[in-house]
Amino acid sequence: GWKMEDVLEEEIKVIRGMVGTQDHVICALSGGVDSTVAATLVYKAIGERLHCVFVDNGLLRYKEQERVMETFEKDLHLPVTCVDASVQFLSELKGVTDPEKKRKIIGKEFISVFDAFAHDLEQKLGKKPTYLVQGTLYPDVIESCPPPGSGKTHSHTIKSHHNVGGLTKDMKLKLIEPLKLLFKDEVRELGKILDVPVSFLKRHPFPGPGLAVRIPGDVNQGNALDILRQVDEIFIQAIKDAGIYDQIWQAFAVFLPVKTTGVQGDQRTHSNAVALRAVTSQDGMTADWYYFEHKFLDDVSRKICNSVRGVNRVCLDITSKPPSTIEWE
Ligand code: XMP
C-alpha cells in the first residue's frame, strides 16, 4: 500500500513540473468520483489555470446537475462551466433505437460540446489550453493494454464507452492522468484527504450515456425520461432511508417500452411498466442481483405507482451478470 498523503504530495509536484507556471488545463467533469478527485487534485496543484466543464446531456438523473454543481462549487471550489446541451443531444437521438448507435451519437455530441468549450476558452485566454485531465484508473490502464497473446480484448469493445482520450480534434492536448496508478478504493482515500465529501465518494457509478441505456429504444418516447427520473429518485431515496445504499454497487430504474393494463382508483389504466435493478459487485465485471426485503419492495412499488403518473406496474430484475449485463443496453 501507498501512503495517500505521500501520493498526493508527489502528484502535486509532478503536475506542477509538467504544467509550469503559464499553461492552462481543461477537464470534463462527469459527476463521478474519478473525474472529481482528479480535478480536485489538479486544482490543488495549479489553481485557477484549471478549467472544468460539466455537460448536461439531457440524460441525467433527477436534479443531477444541481446536485453535482453544488458539490463542485460549494464544497470543492472548482472552476466549472456548466453547459446545457440537452436539446442538442436529445434531438440527435430522435428515432434512434440501436444501443451502440445511441452510444456513438452521445459520444460524438459530447466531443462536439467539449470542443466548443475548449475553443471558447482559447478565445478568452488568447492561447490554447495545453493539457487535459482524465480520471483514468489503474484497472483502465491494464484493461486497455491486455498483454499480447492473453486472448483478452478491451472491455470497451463490448460496450463502447466514451470516456477515453483524444477529446478535441485539433488541439493536441497532452494528458494528465493523476490517478492512473490507483485502484478505486485508493481514489476514495485520496478524495477524503482532498476534502471531497464522503457521501460524494460513495456515490454509485453512473454510465456516461446516462439514462439512455435505461430506456430500451428511443429515449424520446413518451415521457420516458421524466418517468424514469421520478421512479429512480423514489427508489434511490428508499434505499438510502433503509440504510443499504453502501451495500449496493448500483441501483436504478429502467423504463419498459410497453404499456400494460392496470386499475387505479375505479379506472382501468393502460400505462407503462418500470423495472428496478440493484446489484452487488466488486468491479462491475460480474455482479449479483441484490436481495431486498419483501416489505421494502412492497413499499417502493406502492410509492412509485401512487406518485408517478404513467406507471401502473413495477417489476424487479432478478438476473445476475453474467448472463445479463448491469445496464439494460
Ligand atoms: P454493464 O452494463 O456492461 O456495465 O454490465 C458495467 C459497468 O459499466 C457501466 N457502463 C458504462 N459506463 N459508458 C460508461 O461510462 C457506457 O457506455 C457504459 N455502459 C455500462 C455500468 O453502469 C456498470 O457500472
Image: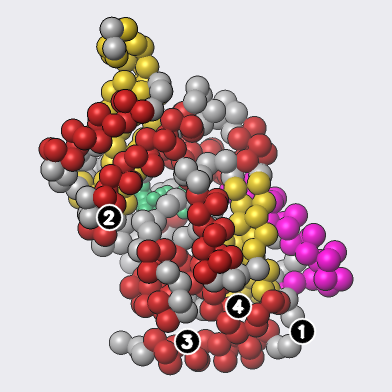
Alpha carbon separation for disc pair 2 and 1: 44 Å
Against 129, is 57 above or below?
A: above
Alpha carbon separation for disc pair 4 and 2: 30 Å
x and y, in percent, of residue 37 in the image: 49, 72
Q: Earlier in the sequence, mark 2 or mark 3?
A: 3
Q: Is mark 2 on a helix, strand or loop?
A: helix
| Residue behind mark 4 | 43
x and y, in percent, of residue 318 in the image: 20, 38
Check disc 2: other Cα within 10 Å, few if <14, some if 14-19, many if 20+. Answer: some
Q: Is residue 234 among the parts visible in the rendering?
A: yes
Alpha carbon separation for disc pair 1 and 3: 22 Å
x and y, in percent, of residue 308 in the image: 38, 27
| Residue behind mark 2 | 245
Type of amino acid at the residue the image marks with label 4: Tyr
Q: Earlier in the sequence, mark 4 or mark 2?
A: 4
Alpha carbon separation for disc pair 3 and 4: 12 Å
Q: Which of marks 2 and 1 is nearer the N terminus?
A: 1
Of tags 1 and 4, which is closer to the observer? 4
| Residue behind mark 3 | 8
Check disc 1: other Cα within 10 Å, few if <14, some if 14-19, many if 20+. Answer: few
Type of amino acid at the residue the image marks with label 2: Tyr
The image's mark for residue 22 is 1
Which of the two residues, 58 or 242, is positioned nearer the viewer here?
Answer: 242
Check disc 4: other Cα within 10 Å, few if <14, some if 14-19, many if 20+. Answer: many
Alpha carbon separation for disc pair 1 and 4: 14 Å
Asked whether disc 1 touches disc 4, contact meaning CB atoms under 8 Å apart, the reply is no
Q: Give the range drawn in magenta.
A: 107-130
Against 128, is 224 above or below?
A: above
